[in-house]
Image: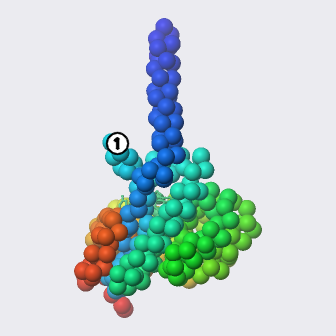
């Protein structure tokens, strides 16, 4: 900026910033009402077993449908919910709704597939999370083995003893624990080796690289191999192409999740897929050697 224009540039900057702060405040206000107004809903994305080609589970993903505005994606409001603490009631609602849906599918006659729920750092840290999960399982009647909790690496970047204790409490309930977005944080698989983690979900940023860069391919390969040696199952996120699938099959990844098979869909749509026996085509499955 030229000197005499400096003031204008500055006020332009603060105006932009002001708008963003207002937007944020507006979103926060609206989010306070969202739960009571029934504006939150869950979509479910199938996970597919690469050996059988069949749906082996689903992940619950929250959506906020704002009247007159449209659907707000979780990346825009989960961080606000985290900051304000609203994630605690929202997170409980998600867990209850997802467990109830899993029970409902089973009652409709579908095979009992596990449902995965994302737990945020604040939920993991601030609630007596294991008690909350136990109460929700009891209330909904879902078998603990049919619930999977997805944690990100940021959750694990706290005091190691506290984390290990909480993870063991959760594990003692009989639920499955998975590490979401693996590879984007700072944890190494060796850091995880004494923690009761069952599944590693390879972040979608790696998948976008496996067919285009040698580094991406070798990183993904080594994540799969290390997880295997630590007896953890692997799920690849964000699988969009057949090329990515054949890579995963060659390197013996266990399961996939991504637009190639299905976008996140509604509960009834999952029921339809289960009824129809929707599965991965034969040539996309992992062949036994
Ligand atoms: P995540 O748990 O890693 O979920 C996977 C995200 O990848 C979802 O985005 C999903 O729609 C998207 N995805 C799936 N397949 C593909 C693909 O093939 N290509 C691409 N590009 N993307 C794909 P979504 O639903 O927007 O959720 C974003 C994040 O928001 C989630 O990432 C999770 O961290 C958070 N989130 C969603 N629901 C909840 C919730 O109920 N509680 C909490 N605490 N966080 C949630
Ligand atoms: Mg997840
Ligand atoms: Mg993820
Ligand atoms: Mg994510």
- Quarter of the image with the C terminus is bottom left
Which residue is rendered at x = 38% and y = 78% of the image?
105
Which residue is rendered at x = 48% and y = 53% of the image?
35
Q: Is residue 2 left or right of residue 168?
A: left
Q: Decide if ligand 1 comes within 8 Å of the CB at mark 1.
A: no
Q: Position of residue 117 (x, y in %)?
A: 50, 67
State the residue position of label 1: 69
Q: Tell which quarter ligand 1 is in.
A: bottom left
Q: Position of residue 223 (x, y in %)?
A: 50, 72
Q: Position of residue 63 (x, y in %)?
A: 40, 55
| Secondary element type, mark 1 | loop
Q: Is residue 56 left or right of residue 225?
A: left
8 or 72, nearer to the observer: 72
Indicate the quadrant where residue 124 lies. Answer: bottom right
- Furthest residue to the right? 161
Q: How is the image coloured?
A: rainbow
- Furthest residue to the top? 4
Q: Is residue 112 above or below residue 81?
A: below
Q: Is residue 226 visible?
A: no
Could you classify mark 1 by the number of other residues whose Cα lies within 10 Å: few (under 14), some (14-19), or many (20 or more)? Answer: few
Q: Is residue 55 above or below residue 156?
A: below
Indicate the quadrant where residue 103 lies. Answer: bottom left
Q: Position of residue 72 (x, y in %)?
A: 39, 48
108 or 75, nearer to the observer: 108
Q: Is residue 272 visible?
A: yes
Q: How many marks?
A: 1
Which residue is rendered at x = 75% and y = 68% of the image?
161
Which residue is rendered at x = 55% and y = 74% of the image?
139
Q: Is residue 99 left or right of residue 70?
A: right
């Amino acid at each position: 900026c030229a000197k005499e224009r400096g003031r204008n540039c500055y006020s332009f900057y603060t105006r932009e910033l002001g708008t963003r702060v207002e937007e944020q405040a507006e979103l926060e206000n609206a989010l306070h009402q969202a739960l009571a107004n029934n504006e939150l809903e869950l979509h479910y994305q199938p996970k597919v077993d690469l050996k059988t080609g069949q749906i082996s589970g689903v992940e619950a993903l929250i959506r906020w449908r704002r009247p007159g505005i449209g659907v707000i994606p979780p990346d825009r409001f989960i961080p606000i919910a985290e900051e304000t603490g609203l994630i605690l009631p929202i997170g409980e609602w998600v867990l209850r709704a997802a467990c109830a849906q899993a029970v409902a599918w089973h009652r409709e006659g579908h095979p009992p597939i596990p449902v995965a729920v994302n737990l945020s750092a604040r939920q993991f840290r601030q609630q007596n999370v294991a008690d909350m999960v136990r109460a929700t399982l009891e209330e909904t009647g879902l078998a603990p083995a049919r619930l999977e909790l997805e944690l990100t690496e940021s959750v694990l970047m706290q005091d190691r003893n506290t984390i290990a204790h909480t993870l063991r409490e959760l594990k003692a309930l009989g639920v499955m624990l998975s590490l979401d977005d693996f590879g984007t944080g700072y944890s190494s698989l060796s850091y995880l080796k004494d923690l009761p983690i069952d599944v590693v979900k390879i972040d979608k940023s790696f998948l976008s690289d496996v067919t285009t860069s040698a580094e991406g391919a070798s990183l993904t390969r080594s994540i799969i191999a290390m997880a295997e040696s630590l007896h953890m199952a692997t799920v690849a996120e964000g699988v969009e192409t057949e090329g990515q699938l054949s890579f995963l099959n060659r390197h013996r990844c266990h399961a996939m999740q991504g637009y190639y098979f299905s976008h996140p869909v509604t509960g009834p749509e999952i029921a339809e897929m289960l009824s129809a026996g929707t599965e991965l085509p034969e040539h996309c499955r992992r062949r036994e050697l």
